[in-house]
């Protein structure tokens, strides 16, 4: 089977990452999976933002967690250093807005960033708040929670066992990665593409796990991914990769 294209932060090579413009563009070009990152504001709202700080992609600065939603919403999320003023009207989305946009059109991988994960489990922590928003949106069957943070996945497994999980890894041992994924009852093991090899493929199969990866933006990598039985891959260029996949033999 051909691997699934996961629009990483939306159509993020062509639109400001993690904005509604980026997700809308990915959906328009036919992506059936979106990936996004969530953080918490000072007043506990679940926003879609990759970095803990606002500096790189918005017109603001400092930690997002130091601002209320109203303050965050006053900023542009148009990634001015990369896109100039072209998308200055974009705002940092709420998770609920992104889920509403994807509803019925695409599944969503929601990555809980470790910046917002606290040492102690909290009723108003990023895990609990994210799961609440997913349930409120009626999106439990359309979503998988991702994280590098094992604690976050343990908490999600306990609080919302019905919502699928995927464990992210960057430069980890393969056996350890598979064991950690199984330990949180996740169905997806998602190592960074540098970790992919035959052993990873074999161990994922033996464990009954779906194997996914990111970021793959070069069509030349597709035959290799297919040979490794990769289930899905995150890309910043979903349009180009969907076209390239069409040319790949079944
Ligand atoms: O989809 C997984 C991938 O997004 C993890 O890395 O830094 O892009 O969030 P990052
Ligand atoms: Ca991510």
Image (spheres, helix red, strand yellow):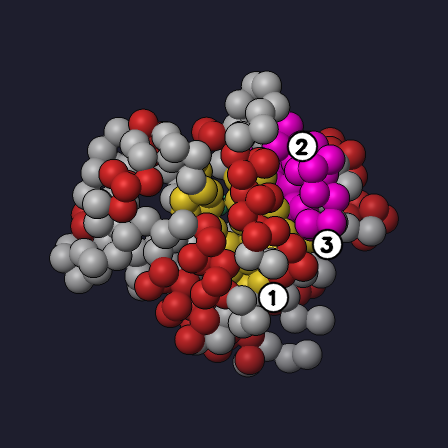
Q: Is mark 2 within 8 Å of ligand 2?
A: no
Q: Which mark is residue 210?
A: 3
Mark nearer the N terminus (2 vs 3):
2
The Cα atoms of the two marked residues, 1 and 2, are separated by 27 Å
Mark nearer the N terminus (1 vs 2):
1
Q: Nearer the viewer, residue 166 or 129?
A: 129
Residue to which mark 1 is pinned: 4
Label 2–label 3 contact, CB within 8 A: no
Q: Nearer the viewer, residue 158 or 112?
A: 158
Residue 63, percent from left and from top: 31, 29
Q: Is residue 201 left or right of residue 74?
A: right
Q: SS of the residue at dot 2?
A: helix
Mark nearer the N terminus (1 vs 3):
1
Q: SS of the residue at dot 3?
A: strand
Which span is picked out in magenta? 151-173
Q: Which mark is residue 18?
A: none
- Asked whether residue 31 appears in the rendered view, the answer is yes
Determine the residue located farthest toward the top in the rendered image. Answer: 120
């Amino acid at each position: 089977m051909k691997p699934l294209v996961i629009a990483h932060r939306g159509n993020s090579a062509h639109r400001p990452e993690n904005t509604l413009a980026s997700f809308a563009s990915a959906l328009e070009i036919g992506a059936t999976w979106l990936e996004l990152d969530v953080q918490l504001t000072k007043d506990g709202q679940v926003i879609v933002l990759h970095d803990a700080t606002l500096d790189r992609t918005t017109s603001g600065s400092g930690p997002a967690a130091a601002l209320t939603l109203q303050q965050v919403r006053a900023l542009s999320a148009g990634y001015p250093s990369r896109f100039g003023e072209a998308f200055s009207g974009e705002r940092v989305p709420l998770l609920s807005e992104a889920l509403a946009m994807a509803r019925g059109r695409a599944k969503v991988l929601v990555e809980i960033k470790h910046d917002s994960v606290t040492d102690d489990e909290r009723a108003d922590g990023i895990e609990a708040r994210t799961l609440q928003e997913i349930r409120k949106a009626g999106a439990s069957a359309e979503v998988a929670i991702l994280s590098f943070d094992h604690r976050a996945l343990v908490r999600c497994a306990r609080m919302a066992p019905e919502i699928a999980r995927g464990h992210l890894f960057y430069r980890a041992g393969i056996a350890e990665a598979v064991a950690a994924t199984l330990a949180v009852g996740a169905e997806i093991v998602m190592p960074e593409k540098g970790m992919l090899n035959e052993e990873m493929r074999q161990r994922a199969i033996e464990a009954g796990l779906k194997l996914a990866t990111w970021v793959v933006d070069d069509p030349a990598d597709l035959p290799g991914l297919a040979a490794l039985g990769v289930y899905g891959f995150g890309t910043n260029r979903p349009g180009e990769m969907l076209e390239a996949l069409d040319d790949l033999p079944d």
